[in-house]
Amino acid sequence: MALISYPPTEEQFLPVTDDTEIICTVFIGNGQSGSYTILLGDQLLGVNQPARLGKKAALIGKTTHVIAQVTDVLQETNWVSLTISMWEGASETRFRPYNIEVPNQNDEVEFIIQIHHS
């Protein structure tokens, strides 16, 4: 089992509303297993669960960090993926899926995704 680092990735997020609380969710895809943490700056907001980030005014100039470790557990494929969403009520802003194919079964991938709020 090897630990593979996904290339560090930075994204931009501009909220569409001023007064709606923003919630960050993480989805580990392709039937894989894993864990993640969500931080706003250096403040831990969530471990393996959605995180309430706050409203637009409180987020401007800050960065959300999503750090995840995903293990390839399926025999059928060596692809792993991670998708991050920012929710403002029913409005979703989705950040990719971040995909990577690992060389071997049970390899792990570490994702470090930074989302800058502007």
Image (tube, helix red, strand yellow):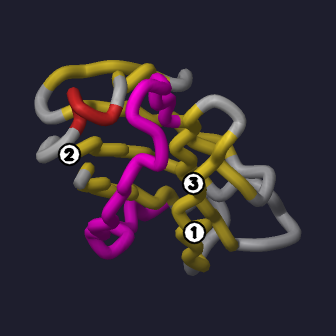
Q: Is residue 30 left or right of residue 16?
A: right
Residue located at (71% from left, 35% from top): 90
Q: CA distance from mark 3 to mark 2?
A: 16 Å
| Percent coordinates x, y for residue 85 in the rendering | 56, 47
Helix, strand or loop status at disc 3: strand
Residue range (magenta): 1-24
- Check disc 2 and report the residue beneath it: 63
| Quarter where residue 91 is shown | top right
Q: Can you tell which quarter of the image residue 45 is in? A: top left
> Horizontal and vertical percent for residue 65?
28, 44
> As displayed, is residue 33 above or below residue 45?
below
- Residue pictured at 57% horizontal, 68% vertical: 96
Number of residues whose C-alpha sits closer than 10 Å to that of mark 2, classed few (under 14), some (14–19) or many (20 or more): many
Residue 96 as seen in the image, left or right of residue 57: right
- What is the C-alpha distance between the residues marked 3 and 1? 10 Å
Q: Residue 9: x percent and y percent? A: 31, 69
Q: Which mark is residue 96?
A: 1
Name the mark on residue 80. Answer: none
User: Which residue is tagged 3?
Assistant: 93
Indicate the position of residue 11 as horizontal and vertical percent values: 33, 66
